[in-house]
Image (cartoon, rainbow, N blue to C red):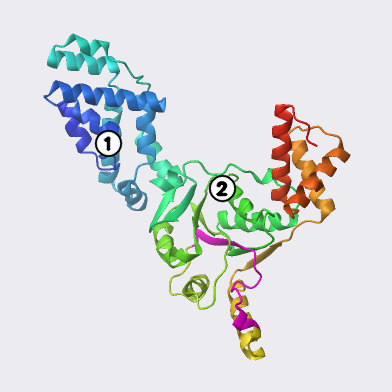
Amino acid sequence: MKELKYKLRSVTAFEIAEDALIKNFCRLADSDIGAAITAYTEITKLLLSANKTLADYLCELLTYSESPLIESYLKDKSENQFYAIEYDVSVIRELAAFSAHKVKDYLFGKFNENLIFSLPEYVSGGFDKTAEYFIEHVRKYGAGIYARYKAFVYENGAVVPVENPDTVRLSEFKKYEAQRGQIVDNTRAFIAGQPADNVLLYGDRGTGKSSTIKALINEYDMLRIIQLDKRDVAAIPSIYEAVKNSPLKFIIFIDDLSFGENDECFGTLKKVLEGSLCVRPANAVIYATTNRRHLIKETESSRVGDNVHRADEIDESVSLSDRFGLFITFLAPNKDVYLEIVQGIAIDRGIIIDKDKLYRCAERFALRRNSRSPRTARQFIDSIQSKIALGIDID
């Protein structure tokens, strides 16, 4: 076990030294029985809680670890680099062979305590991955958090993964086919390495602008999304720098974009979109949504100003919109389209209700909220689905 401990500490191709399981396997070689048994218990608890075999855990650990050495190997193809990767994989294969029985035998031989055999056990599984497997995975998906997760938010100066992103699919949306078609075509071109535009989705609330963007990552395996607040637009160049060498494609998503007068973020975003010394990498685009055609909110003073001043402010506002190559409009549906959306969602969910009754209740629901939109339609269907499940009349 001591030899394995030293081998684990010599791993260079995968940054796994701080992983809890790796640390606890190293602690099994501790001369104190209490520390060694605690380490074994922590290993077992970790694997049982995750419902994973030791081999599966280790495979996942290597697959999604940071790996500058493999990234370097993909550029240089050095034999010494490949040997280092092979060596590390052989060490992990050796670790994966340490079954609970084998560890218990080791601890008993060291401490001669029968209680060791009464401890719970984990499942070893089989580790059959090769160096080539991990190299290919990094070549295709990169390494680290971007390989493991699909959605991220920018918070407190860092890109943070979203553990459970929205699972919405484009097929769930009703109507607005022309608008979504433009977004999908642009995204497919982007993923294929063809010229693609930054996109601004403008329109009424609840029409599916943000949801459409979020749904894209559930359609395309190579796509990632990083959402940030408009106050963080100054961080976009640093995000560009962080992702530019990744084989993945990144949408930088800014939701509900609008600015007050003299807002520094307005000028910053203009420079990022066009005019900055920082060039947008080929694997990143900006998709944003807004409820305002003119992105600068008017104040009372700007409304009563002279015509030249007002025209200049409008031109300034439109100048940002124009920097998005694709401008797509989502307007609230009329009554007939709203009811068609309601019916489409009801059919998707297997809800069978008299059409006239469904429409009557849906319209009443919309009037109470003073809103007809796809969001209102989904909220209405949610409410009647719950009522049906509880045996309550939807009227």
Instruction: Name above or below for residue 388 compared with residue 306.
Output: above
Residue closest to the far top: 114
Q: Quadrant of residue 197?
A: bottom right
Looking at the image, which residue is at 21% across and 21% down? 37
Whether residue 142 is visible:
no
Residue drawn where x is 55% and y is 71% of the image:
259
Q: Give, as a single range, the part of the protein colored magenta.
A: 282-303
Q: Which residue is mark 2?
A: 217
**Residue 38 spot, x, y in % from top left:** 22, 24
Task: Please tell me whether residue 315 belongs to the stretch shown in magenta.
Answer: no
In the rendered view, tell whether residue 139 sits above or below residue 259: above
> Between 259 and 391, which is closer to the camera in this rendering?
391
Secondary structure at badge 2 equals: loop
What amino acid does circle 1 point to?
Asp
As drawn, the label of residue 354 is none
Q: Which residue is mark 1?
A: 88
Q: CA distance from mark 1 to mark 2?
A: 33 Å
Q: Helix, strand or loop at disc 1?
A: helix
- Amino acid carrying mark 2 in the image: Ile
Which quadrant of the figure contains the N terminus? top left
Residue 94 x %, y %: 27, 26
- The single residue placed furthest to the right in the displayed view is 356
Residue in the picture at 42% in, 50% down: 160
Tell me, yes or no, whether the highlighted magenta stretch contains residue 294: yes
As drawn, the residue found furthest toward the left would be 31
- Quadrant location of residue 196? bottom right
Viewer-proximal residue among 157 and 271: 157
Identify whether 100 is placed above or below 146.
Answer: above
